[in-house]
Structure formats: C-alpha cells, structure tokens
Amino acid sequence: MASGIFGGEARGRARRVVRPVAPALADALDAQNARYAPSATRDAHLAALRSGAAAVVTGQQAGLFLGPLFTVYKAATTIRLARALAEEWGVPVVPVFWLQTEDHDLPEIAHCHVAPSRGATLRLELPASDDHVSVAHRVLPEGITACLNELRDDLSHLPHAGAHLARLERHYRPGAGWGEAFAGVLSELFAEEGLVLLDPRDQALAPLAAPVHRRAIVDARPIAEALIERVRALAAAGVHVRAAAPLSFFHPDGPEGRRYRLVATEGGYAEVGGTRVHTEGALLAALESRPLCFSTSALLRPILQDTWLPTAAYVGGPAEVAYFEQMGPLYAAFELPMPLVVPRLRLRLLGEKPRRLLARLKLSADQACLPEDEALAAARGQTVGGTDGAEVSQRLLETFDAAVRDLVPTLRAAGEGIDEAIEKTRGTVARAVGKLGEKYDKARLHRDQSTVEEVRRLQAWIYPEGKPQERVYGVSYFAAKHGERAFIDRIVAAAEPFDAALKDIEL
C-alpha cells in the first residue's frame, strides 16, 4: 500500500471522485439508515457523504437469510477497501451496499442452504411466483415462520444459535419486506464497521433517477450501438443487450406492478412478455409524472449508482467483474468515469469437521474439490495397488489383436473389404474395453464404502453440489457455531484488498 494503490495517479483520482452527494440523496440515505440499528460509525460515514467523500460500493439481491456467503464477503471486501483507500488518499472513503431491490427474480433468492450441522445440508425455501414484480414490493409470507423453526431445530445445539436466530426473527417475519428483512440483518452484522445501505427503490429517490432513465430512453439507439461490439462478451457474462432497446424497465401498471423490458418496434417500444406498445413520448410523460414506474437493468444499475455516488471502486463477483470490463462505451455514453473494479474476497471455510476429514483422508482442500472419482483416487492413491483399468483394457485388446492376427488369412480369403472391417471392429473393441477399464477403476474406488462416505461428507462441507462453498451455504451455521461477531471479524480480517486468490481459513 505504501507505494500507492494507483501509483502517481492516486491523489488525482481522489480529487476527481470526491464530492458531496446531492442533498436529496443525503436526506434519503439518512432516512433509510435511521431504520437500522444505531451505529456511530455509520452516522459518521453518512455525514462524510453529505459533506464530501469517495465511496466504495458493492451490491447484491436480497436473498433469504442473506443468501449465499459471498454476500458477506462482498460487504467485508468493500469495508476493507474503503479503509485502505482512505488511508492511502487521506480523504474519507465510505463503504456502501446497494440493495438490489429493483430486481424481480424472486425464485432465484427465495431459498438458502445451511451447512450440514447434523450431518445433512438443510435447504430452506419459500414459495415464490415469477410475476416480474420488483422485490422491493414483495413481502415475506407466513411460511417464513416454518423456515425459522426448521433453522432453529437444525442449529439449536450450537453455542451461539440463540443470538443469531433471535436476530433473524426480528427481521424475517410474516409481512416484512424482502429488502427490509435483508437490510435489517446486514446492517446489524456490519454496524461496527459502519456499512451504509442504499435502497434505490425509494419514492424519495425516484426523481433523482429520472434523468438517467430519460437518457436511456431518448438515446436508446446510440447507447445500444455503442455496446454492440461488446454484446457477445456481455452475453457470456449473463447480461443481454437488445438493439435500440432502452436499458430501463417500465412498470406501466404502477410501481408495484409487473416490470417489462422494452424493445424497439414500429410506433415505439413493445413490452417483452406483454401486449402493449408505448411511444417514446408516452414513456417520457410517465417518467415525468411517475418516476418510480421505471427501474434499472443490470447494465443501467451501475450508471445510476455512479451518477448518484462518488464511486471510486466497485466490488464484484467474477461475473460482475467480467461484464464491467465491457462497460466502457456505456460509461462514455453517460459521460461518467468508470470506477476501479475490484474482485470480492473468495474463501473456503474449513471448520473442525472438514479439517478432520482432510487429515484422515490425506487430502488437500483442492483435491477434495475434484470430481468424486478423482478425489477418491487421490484419497486411496497410497493403498489401491494391483491391476488398474488401463492394464485391464490393454491386456484385453492385446488378446483381441493376437486372435485377429491368427485369423487374418482366413478372413481375407472371404473376399475384398475385410481389412476395413477389421479396422472398424478393432476401434469398436478398443472403445468397449476402454469403458470396461473405466468401470473397473470406478468399482475399485468405490468398494471401500467408508472412504466413499467420508469423501462425500467432506465435499458436502467444502464443495457442495459441485460448486464453491461460498455460492451455496449461507451464514447461519457459521454464525451459530462461532458467534456472529467473531465470524464477521474473521471475514473482514481475511478481506485483503485486491487479493482475488481463493483462501482457506480455519474456524
């Protein structure tokens, strides 16, 4: 850090981004954050945004019980990076968490997984209709009580379960908003660090978003053309661009109604998935009178974010980093400087149980994340011995080849074309005995059922469902086992800015 995060440009970059946020935004942020548990550090950060500061921003959908672990990893990275930049630049830098409540994909966030406290992963899920209504306008159903009861039954034997579950129950209750519950828990977990939360789906903020939506509508065609060369790369990152289509969503039936993408058509813009066509004039009139009837797409959200905030850096996951790399033309179209894009913390949490299994199986954590057969082979590599599948296949093929050599004169005497038939048959036999060898190896690997079960238990802990742990499990087991504050402290301490390498930490 001593040499300067941006080298000789560090001070210049600080001067460029540091500014007070608009008074209306500052007032809305004060009002939103006043709903959360008190935090003197957060109050100081809000005051800094009002008077002049830079910001480090991250964001995430409002998943059930905070969603996967990477939610808290994003927050922790944002906090550590803000501290580092403030120290480097000598100016206030505020960590901000953007609540992605404009999104409508409720089925994607209406479930969570709890690490196997009692031997099996617990999946909690709420009914979720895909009606394209922004999550900001959805409330938790009665079923949230049953989810909390299941969670309590699963975690009740752990030392800090009571405190963690009490916190969840204060916020996740029937009738509470999805975003409200998510924000309440997140704000409390990071109150000590002063994480500022911003919910863009706020009536007070809608007029401040209107200029961004206006440009997205009026300049839809040149903006799309500016992005056209990046379409393939953006699509690979899960972000789609439609020719001449605005990057705004429209809620024609009111803010709490279904939101529609719009696509250019004769006479204006047609609703994707709907039946109506809206002229540009009608859209602009609706924007003037009902600005909350518009919301951002994945591409427009960063533009709104950096229009409102003095964003020095954005912290994102791998997919976000990938699509930010393609957004230069979009930032240029809106005459905004691009922030530094920083990868979030990546962790593999190794508690007592997975550490014991790793030691007993003599595996590294990386080996344990291999496909099951490869992990079994690594675990049993010292003891399997004997004939392997490759040798079985080779011996069988040699026997076939010897028999064919003996029979070649007889076969050729039958007429023309036999050599080609022999060659094709040999290829078929080679493939068949190869598959037999593979099945033989697999059977040998699985014959020790106790080793198989141990490898599967280990993988359930650190590579569940064949995915990185941080993309599956939520915070609840770890908070209940180790204590919320102790767990958050470990995560924040691990979040070294600009370090994107996967880290193993022992809990």
Image (spheres, rainbow, N blue to C red):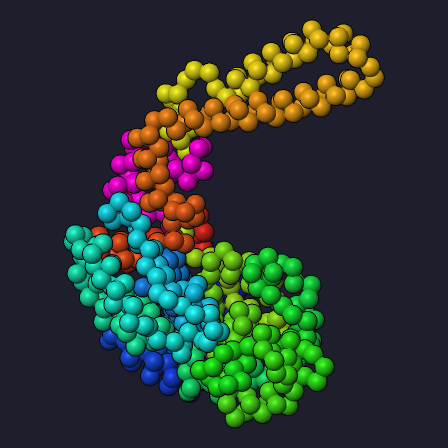
Q: How many marks?
A: 0
* Magenta stretch: helix, strand or loop mostly: helix
Residue 423 image point, x, y percent: 72, 20
Magenta part of the chain: 347-374
Q: In the image shown, does 1 or 360 lie closer to the viewer?
A: 360
Whether residue 351 is situated above or below residue 443 in the rendered picture: below
Q: Is residue 431 found left or right of 375 in the rendered image?
A: right
Identify the residue shown where x is 67% and y is 20%: 426
Whether residue 106 is situated above or below residue 420 in the rendered picture: below
Identify the residue shown where x is 43% and y is 48%: 467
Where residue 450 sits, quadrant-wise, is top left
Residue 99 within the magenta-colored segment of the rendering: no
Residue 106 image point, x, y percent: 43, 68
Identify the residue shown where x is 52% and y is 82%: 251
Residue 171 image point, x, y percent: 26, 72
Q: Is residue 82 found left or right of 44 in the rendered image?
A: right
Identify the residue shown where x is 79% and y is 12%: 414
Q: Is residue 28 found left or right of 418 in the rendered image?
A: left
Q: In the image shown, does 331 or 13 lie closer to the viewer?
A: 331
Residue 366 within the magenta-colored segment of the rendering: yes
For the question of whether residue 340 can be seen, the reply is: yes
Location of the N terminus (image quadrant): bottom left
